[in-house]
Amino acid sequence: MEDGYVVAAKPSARRASGTVGAWIAASGCHRRFDSKASACEFARAASPEGRTLWVQDAHPLDPTEADGYLLARRSSRRNNEAELPGEQVGLPTRR
């Protein structure tokens, strides 16, 4: 694989950001960055006001050619409520 960090934009990121939508329309959902740090900087810059985009590493056994994914958190805001910082939630345990 070539040097750099390949990011695949997920539909959530496309729906949240016009910048990401334009990128996908112009060149497809994969984009190569110089590094993960560069990809994260792009995510911060492409995040519209009140929404958060971030880069998450792909699982090592993921069959795609991406090193990571560009994601957006689902918005549960109503009207003009500010988006609050998210919390990581664990998987439910089966009883």
Image (spheres, rainbow, N blue to C red):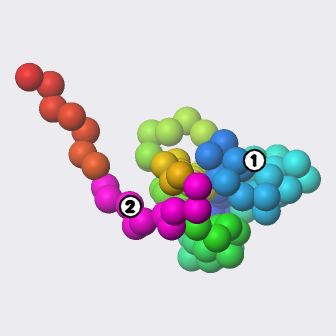
Residue 84: mark: none
Up the image or down, 41 lies above or below 70; here it is: below
Question: Residue shown at 91%/53% (left/top)?
Answer: 26
- Can you tell which quarter of the image residue 10 is in? top right
Going 57% across and 76% down the picture, which residue do you hit?
37
Magenta stretch in the rendered image: 79-88
Secondary structure category for the residue under label 1:
loop
Task: Look at label 1 and name its amino acid.
Answer: Cys
Asked if residue 4 can be seen in this view, the reply is no
Residue farthest along the right direction in this orientation: 26
The overriding secondary structure of the stretch rendered in magenta is loop
Quadrant containing the N terminus is bottom right
Task: Give the total number of marks visible in the rendering.
Answer: 2
Between the C-alphas of marks 1 and 2, the distance is 25 Å
Residue 42 in the figure: left or right of residue 94: right
Q: Nearer the viewer, mark 1 or mark 2?
A: 2
**Residue 1 shown in magenta:** no
Report the residue marked by disc 1.
Answer: 29
Q: Is residue 65 left or right of residue 57?
A: right
Pinpoint residue 32: horizontal percent, then vertical percent.
72, 62
The x and y percentages for residue 9 are: 67, 50
